[in-house]
Amino acid sequence: WNATYFRPACMQLQDKFAEHDRLKLASKLFPEDENPLRFSEDCLYLNVYAPDGDPPDDGWPVMVWFHPGDFNVGAASLWDASVFAVKQKIIVVVPSYRLDIFGFFTTLDGHAPGNWGLLDQVAALDWVRNQIKEFGGKPET
């Protein structure tokens, strides 16, 4: 994997993005052509922040944090948990998940049941349980 840059954020409606306070601030910090947030349907990634040094014998505690945004807007890359991970001596995982109509569209008839965004979150938790040991974490925390 290439961990030198953040992957694109999940697709979302730009007018809702501009209304959210934290995201509005982020968009003002960067000129349009330098905005670090890019959007793509290929967006299901996790950011893993781990403390420096060797983990304890039983591993670092693990915290999974899902970004806010009312299931409509947001991006895992807006939340840098590196300092928190180092200071608290825990591993922090910040997953992306599908938003708005890409994550919660439904036809209400069973053909498109919706809640894909929540299923993305469940898949992220499964990944953490199965893989976090490779990062020095305790899967059972």
Image (spheres, grey):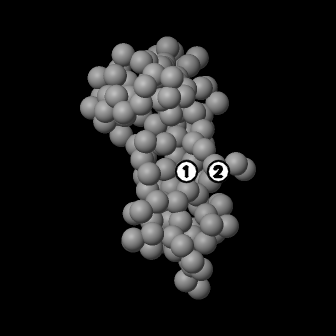
Secondary structure beneath dot 2 equals loop
Task: Identify which residue is drawn at 63% across, 66% down.
Answer: 135
Q: Is residue 141 visible?
A: no
Residue 7 is tagged as none
Task: Identify which residue is drawn at 38% across, 28% down.
Answer: 27
Residue named by callout 1: 47
Residue 3 is tagged as 2
The one of 104 and 81 positioned closer to us in this rendering: 81
Image position of 29 (left or right of 103): left
Q: Is residue 27 visible?
A: yes
Position of residue 99 relative to residue 124, above or below, is: above
Mark nearer the N terminus (2 vs 1): 2
The one of 56 and 29 positioned closer to us in this rendering: 29
What's the residue type where badge 2 is placed? Ala
Residue 43 x %, y %: 60, 34
Secondary structure beneath dot 1 equals strand
Image position of 26 (left or right of 124): left
